[in-house]
Amino acid sequence: GNEVGGDTVGVDNGPSVKGRSGITGPLLSFNKLENLQALYLGSNKLTGTIPYDFLDGLADKESMVAIDLIGNQLTGQVPSSLVQFEKFSLFLAGNKISGIASGVCLKEGWMDEMAGIKGCDSILCPVNYFSPIGRDNGDAENACVPCEDFTDAEFYGSIACADASEKEAMKEREILTELYNSLGGASWEVQHGWLDPGISVCSWWGITCVSDSVESVESIHLNQNGLKGEVPSSLFELRYLDEINFSDNDITISFK
């Protein structure tokens, strides 16, 4: 749902609106909002880094501020500029965060004062550690624990560790999601299953995988389906893809 007001701003694209791509593009700085107390932008498709001037315009930097950016595609570090906030709850699990700037973890009032107890783990579990919520909130079941042998967690704030085959499957899902967003998937004639996190990509309309036991994309048939736009080059990173049918659509494609 959408919520906009003097102190709360939010567009949450969670499970209730499954199949929509949500907000795309870089995260804005929101540095003109003087009275913001809560920002809900979880489960969208925000990309890029957290701006260094993020929320700079807040008049009161001593009061509680809650920021939900869970489940986007944000990269880079949690910036050191955020140390200006005293009581800050930043929810970032499920992104592609590569680090937390020095000083941030020393803010004892952060994360409902859990940062004073758990340090950086209260914000995000480190690389090769995970938690069901991507951080340690003080509950034993949500502690950051190391990945098991032959698995890893590449980014901060992981909710699970993955082996090589699982990482390949996640990459294929990301590529197909980019294809959907780039070619106007929300307006396709048929889009059954697309972007549904609860089913295999092999069950998405027009997708055929190698076999029931090998869930790698082998062919894509989306002819006469209302596709519009430029086919992303990442499509050709699908290792087992050997057949594409995008005929009778309004698309462009480059093989460079």
Image (cartoon, rainbow, N blue to C red):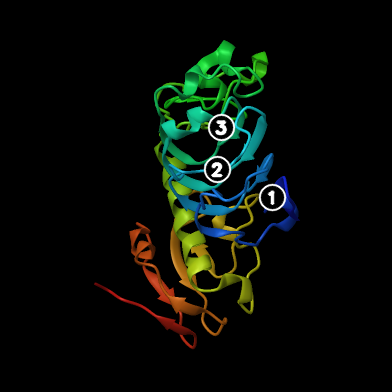
Circle 3 or circle 1, nearest the eye:
1
- Type of the residue with mark 1: Val
For marks 1 and 2, give the CA distance: 12 Å
The structure residue drawn at horizontal position 43% and vertical position 25%, both measured from the top left corner, is 128
N-term-proximal mark, 3 vs 1? 1
Where, by quadrant of the figure, is residue 91 drawn? top right
Where, by quadrant of the figure, is residue 112 drawn? top right
Check the image and name the residue furthest to the bottom. Answer: 248
Q: Disc 2 marks which residue?
A: 55
Circle 1 or circle 2, nearest the eye:
2
Question: From where the camera sits, is residue 155 visible?
Answer: no
Check the image and name the residue furthest to the left. Answer: 256
Q: Which percent across, then down, holds residue 21?
A: 60, 61
Q: Secondary structure at mark 3?
A: loop
- The one nearer the camera, 164 or 138, is 138
Circle number at residue 9: 1
Q: Is residue 80 above or below residue 253?
A: above
Question: From where the camera sits, is residue 179 visible?
Answer: yes
- Type of the residue with mark 3: Ile
Q: Which percent across, then down, holds residue 83?
A: 49, 27
Q: Secondary structure at mark 2?
A: loop
Check the image and name the residue furthest to the front. Answer: 59
N-term-proximal mark, 3 vs 2? 2
Q: Secondary structure at mark 1?
A: strand
Circle number at residue 159: 3
Circle number at residue 117: none
